[in-house]
Image: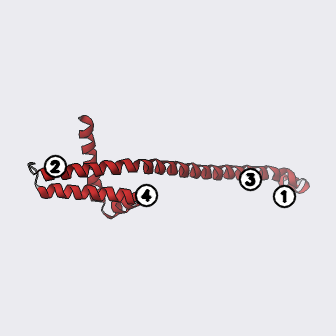
Amino acid sequence: MGSIMEEETLKNPGFYNEGQSASSSMSGDRTDIKQEGKEQVKRIGGLTRQRAFSQVDSRKGALVESLNGFARQLESISSQGDVQVPQHLIGSAVGFVRKASDTLEQNSTEELLRQAQTKMRERPGVALAGCALLGFVAARFLKA
């Protein structure tokens, strides 16, 4: 002898199962919407990333030219000879600026970002110190 629910289920099996199928259908709809939302976010993120990289790539040439001009100025200062800074220090600065300029010119933004991430993972202390120094220099520059 079963309960009243069991008897009703035997007599009218679709009635009690309709609620279960409706809730599972709603759950499926939620999953579909959730999945569609995730895919849309990925597409938007990819488009945003592409636009950002193209913006940086388009301005990279101006930065390379500025660095080359700065290197030429440093070279002209070192050739004058009457500066109070040692020649080898200016030569090192020129080499560093030229290397940075060449690296920017020869690599895409994605490659530069990948290289930076790799370097930061290899030596996080140096990366943190570099970020702190960069922040200090930027603050001093903005105050002036």
Q: Which of the 4 image quadrants contains residue 6?
A: bottom right
Label 3: which residue?
A: 24
In this view, the mark in front (3 or 1) = 3
In this view, the mark in front (2 or 4) = 2
Position in image of residue 34 (x %, y %) = 64, 50
Which residue type does callout 4 highlight?
A: Ser
12 with respect to 83 (left or right): right
In this view, the mark in front (2 or 3) = 2
Task: Rate crowding at label 2 as few (under 14), some (14 to 19) or many (20 or more) other CA atoms within 10 Å.
Answer: some
Contact check, label 2 and label 3, Cβ < 8 Å? no
Q: Alpha-carbon distance for marks 3 and 4?
A: 49 Å
Position in image of residue 17 (x %, y %) = 82, 53
Label 2: which residue?
A: 77
Q: Alpha-carbon distance for marks 1 and 4?
A: 74 Å
Which residue appears at 78% of the width and 49% of the height? 22
Which residue type does callout 2 highlight?
A: Ile
Q: Pick whichever, 77 or 131, lies toward us.
A: 77
Q: What secondary structure is found at the residue carrying circle 3? A: helix
